[in-house]
Image (cartoon, rainbow, N blue to C red):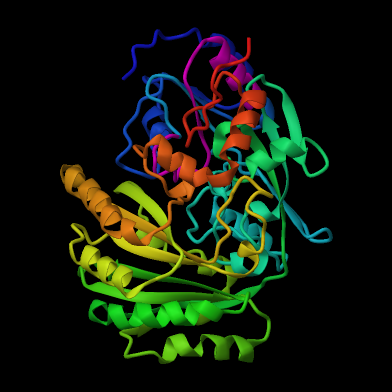
Amino acid sequence: MLDVETPPIAALEASLSGEVLTPDAPGYDAARRIHNGLIDKRPTVIARCRHTADVVDAINFGRDEGMEISVRGGGHNVAGKAVTDGGLMIDLSPMKGIHVDPVRQTVRAQPGVLVGELDRASAAFGLATPSGVVSSTGIAGLTLGGGLAWLMSRYGTAVDNLLSAEVVLASGEIVTAGEDADAELFWALRGGGGNFGVVTSFEYRAHPVADVLGGPVLHPVAAAPELFSFYRDFASDLPDDLGTQAAFLHAPDGSGTKLCGIATCHCGGDAQRAEAQIRPVRDFGTPVADMIARVPYPAINTGMDWLFPKGTCDYWTSAFFEELSEEAIAAMVAAFERAPSDLCALVLEDFHGAATRVDPTSTAYPHRQPGFNLLVISSWRDAADTEAGIAWAHDTFAALAPYTAKRAYTNYLSADDHEARVREAYGPNYDRLVQLKRRYDPHNLFHLNQNIAPGEPKA
């Protein structure tokens, strides 16, 4: 824990409509915990904000007191950078407001909203917006990092559907960024993470999606070489309406049985066409389970929730495959066989369609090439297994490195990824992001993120 003198907090307590928690306060331990049980940090002060004015007061307080500031949204944050050790944690999780405009087909949501909550509110009006793949994910971190989603091949990523954002800057100023107002900041927010301010409201474009045809088809792990070869070929020519993933994972019944599978999400309105386009996945091989069904859109984002239980120790890393060679498949099979926990998994997220038809420099999120994003999930229950869990993630990444591109998704980076990996995550947009960081946060007040350092601050 950092040696930080406890600042006077009476003024902050008096101004905030939310709670101000110190280490001896009831609720402090619950508030400092995030989804990843590996993270055990102790802020000096937690400001639980309820609205934008609270965020302004918290930022001003932390800046004026010289405190390190972290910002927590929904709390998934696998890298643990939502929590400061010894500083001020600005907790946005109480900010849960959602407003759906069915006429304009837009959704406005505050930063404490989770994916499942956004989905439910939108679905009441027969609408949906690309919102990730796990219902417990916070929309703030998801969106600011780019926002991969089941619907991205049809409608683009979360940032492609962001219309505007209300932001509190390091100065405490409130601005609204959009294509027609503060366009440079709006560009940076769409993939630049939390580097430029605290977003207190997101406005998204929504789409008429009531239900989808989706779910996984699972096979024994022995079928993996043939299944992934089939998947590579199947995914090479998919319609925009069909999003897919493939994975190595363990059975959710706790047996530890190693499996592999393909999951689908078809958002097209023609039921017969959807069935026909998914049929090759259902017909391949001899699956142990076929769970594809027509479900309401919010349900598709709960299908993987069991793989991300709150409180387990998590360490992730990621890379991109531009092509899925037989050698890469063999390396994944070998790596998964060595997995030290039944919560470990390897996931491939297919990139095609609308998400790949966006210029890589039109938003700060740059990864628009067709192919597959690889997510290495190392997760375990007992802290005593931490060394083995992290080692497996590192070893797996190293074994697959000969087959992957030097690109990364910021939301999947680990706490100890070095600067070169962060630069790879921002890709060709890094230099422009540095310039905008100097403009909006020259003293790097917001540095607990996949950080874009501004260099020498302005006088």
Q: Is residue 350 magenta?
A: no
Image quarter of residue 15: top right
Coordinates of residue 406 in the picture (x, y in percent):
43, 51
Q: Quadrant of residue 179?
A: top right
Q: Is residue 290 above or below residue 265?
A: below
The foreground one among 72 and 193 is 193
Q: Is residue 54 visible?
A: no
Picture layout, residue 242 above or below residue 399: below
Task: Indicate the position of residue 301 as horizontal and vertical percent values.
Answer: 51, 64
Q: Position of residue 94 (x, y in %)?
A: 56, 37
* Quadrant of the frame with the N terminus: top left
User: Residue at point 35% right, 83% down?
Assistant: 289
295 on left or right of 325 = right
Q: Is residue 41 visible?
A: yes
Image-based side of 69 in relation to 192, left or right: left
Q: Quadrant of residue 173?
A: top right
Viewer-proximal residue among 357 and 100: 357
Q: Quadrant of the C terminus?
A: top right
Is 58 on the left-hand or right-hand side of 23? right
Above or below, 404 relative to 447: below
Residue at 50% of width from left, 7% of height from top? Answer: 8
Residue 65 shown in magenta: yes
Number of numbered discs present? 0
Q: Residue at x 35, y 60 (%)?
A: 307
The x, y position of residue 237, in whole percent, is 55, 80
Instruction: Please state the extent of the stretch shown in magenta in the rendering.
Output: 55-81
State the residue at coordinates (54%, 16%). 62
